[in-house]
Amino acid sequence: MKTEVLMPMLGEGITEGTIVRWWKKPGDLVKKDETLLEISTDKVDSEIPSPFEGTVVEIKAQENETVAVNTVIAVIDAAAAGGAEAREEAPRPAAATKPAPASPPPAPAPAQPKPAPASPPAAAPSPAGAMEVEMPMLGEGITEGTIVRWWKKPGDFVKKDETLLEISTDKVDSEIPSPFEGTVLEILAAESQTVTVGSVIAKISAGKGVSASKTEKPSAPAPAPAPAPAPAPVSTPALQPAAATNETPRRESGGRFFSPLVRNIARAEGIGKDELAEIPGTGLEGRVTKQDILSYLETRGAAPSRPAPAPAAASRPSPPQQPAAPARPAPSAGEVTEKWQGERVEVLPMDAIRKKIADHMVLSKQTSPHVYGVAECDFTAVLNLVSKHKNAFQGREGFKLTVNPFILYAVTRAAKDFPGVNASVEGYNVIRKRFINIGMAVATERGLIVPVLKNADELNFTGIARTAYDLAIRARDKKLNIEDVQGSTLTVTNYGVFGNIIGFPIINQPNVAIMGVGAIKKRPVVIETGQGDMIGIRAIGFLTLSYDHRIVDGELGDKYLQRVRHYLETFEEAWM
């Protein structure tokens, strides 16, 4: 049975990919989960495993060709794989039969069992027809996802690109389409279960006709696919015999994840899994990034006589700067419920978003020494501009004018003046960004989400207002993409919408500063004039800045905070 291979969707916001390399050519046999090709997007290079086993019949997209998502890029004959398996099993009982089945017989082989009444128990077509659905990689920094909801159940028929399940990651819920058409045979990951990227979460039978034999398939084929993943990694050494016994897995038994790009570099450079495990990582949860492995290769090549892992670990002090989560496992919901049994309490397990927020906040406090600054800001000029332009603005843009775009504009403009707050830390290195991506904390019914206003330094006031409004609406409607919540360089949170006047927010890693805005209230203040001091009623709000004292000293933090205050108090109408 010939099945089409589609250009996969590597992220909700990814619409196309470029074929970097085909690992298999027409006529080659590819096993399920064996690397079929390598794809490059604007964010990451990914090795794409074959979704099923068979012979590559046709390649429809050439190397260096950019292809839209869901476009057919190859055709694989799954029936040929069944014939190959039959030939491999036949020599075991009788070695003399090996010369007989030459290359022509594979086609008749599957045709003979079909008319015979004994063919269904053999279930030879089922390994080729049953395909595994893996937890997709929705972004370079995403290593796991939580199953929120299965839209299809065992026995249901699902069409290609029809929503199969909903997955919750660090910040976003994503609806995942089915990669192919068929009947859902088995669901291997339950709702609310957290699964690592690349793990098998379901099995689907390929084709429309298999639903008729649905009752026979779960009994016989279910055990058959189970051993398939085991030999899959063994097939890759054909590309690199020297490192056959040291193939790098996606995730070590200890739980450390290696991205496809890192594994690709490791394989090309002959770095085995044991050596790769010794490379210290500066990414999320100690992940080895592209820069980490490239830096290691430079050290490795410069001093081949010395053991590479030791100098690499000594030269990178990043692990102490990125503390891991506490080793003591958190108590389960059952243990906590049992502890409080009989008491007047209610035990509420955290959902996936709340868990991620909790872990992220603890990591930030462990990573960054927080220092806080507070400034009193007169918003009277801003509120006068809002009142003056609100009707014209809403008629032109279709949404209300508020103080939020004024705050975002001032924060961005001040960051241009003091780029030291628009940075991050990697080990003992300061990464100063030449672009400004403002994270906007948005409160939703699911918890706090921080969509990112990309390249705010290149936008005018109206552009910032439009983008911020769009991100806030999509955040509340659960329509954000993975790219919408990644890449912030500086963050703003407005706790004043709830009436609070002062707050001290936690830094959003890997940023080194976060601006907090309190409620704006009318207060009597002393106003200095040429004729003397007087008491007046002004719209006053407090600005707070939390900053990372590792690289932001008090002088820099205070000057930046005062510059934001200055821009808000003297906001020019021409900036709009």
Image (cartoon, rainbow, N blue to C red):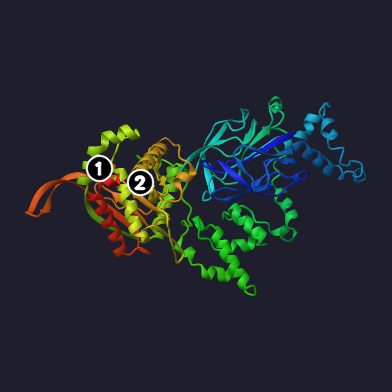
User: Circle 2 is placed at which residue position?
Assistant: 460
Q: Residue at the location (29% across, 64% down)?
A: 555
Residue found farthest to the front: 574
Name the spot of residue 256 as percent of width and height, x first: 56, 55
Q: Is residue 159 visible in the rendered structure shown here?
A: yes
Name the spot of residue 315 as percent of width and height, x first: 52, 70
Quadrant in the picture for residue 428: bottom left
Disc with the residue nearer the chain's start (1 vs 2) = 2
Q: Is residue 557 above or below residue 72?
A: below
> Which residue is at the front of the view, 565 or 353?
565
The 10 Å Cα crowd at callout 1, few under 14, some 14 to 19, many 20 or more, is few
Q: Which type of secondary structure does the marked residue at label 1 adopt?
A: loop
The C terminus is located in which quarter? Answer: top left
Name the residue type under label 1.
Gly
Q: Is residue 351 left or right of residue 287?
A: left
Q: Is residue 377 above or below residue 307?
A: above
User: Circle 1 is placed at which residue position?
Assistant: 499
The N terminus is located in which quarter? Answer: top right
Q: Which type of secondary structure does the marked residue at label 2 adopt?
A: loop
Residue 118 marker: none
Q: Residue at the location (63% across, 70% down)?
A: 301
> Which residue is at the front of the view, 212 or 79?
79
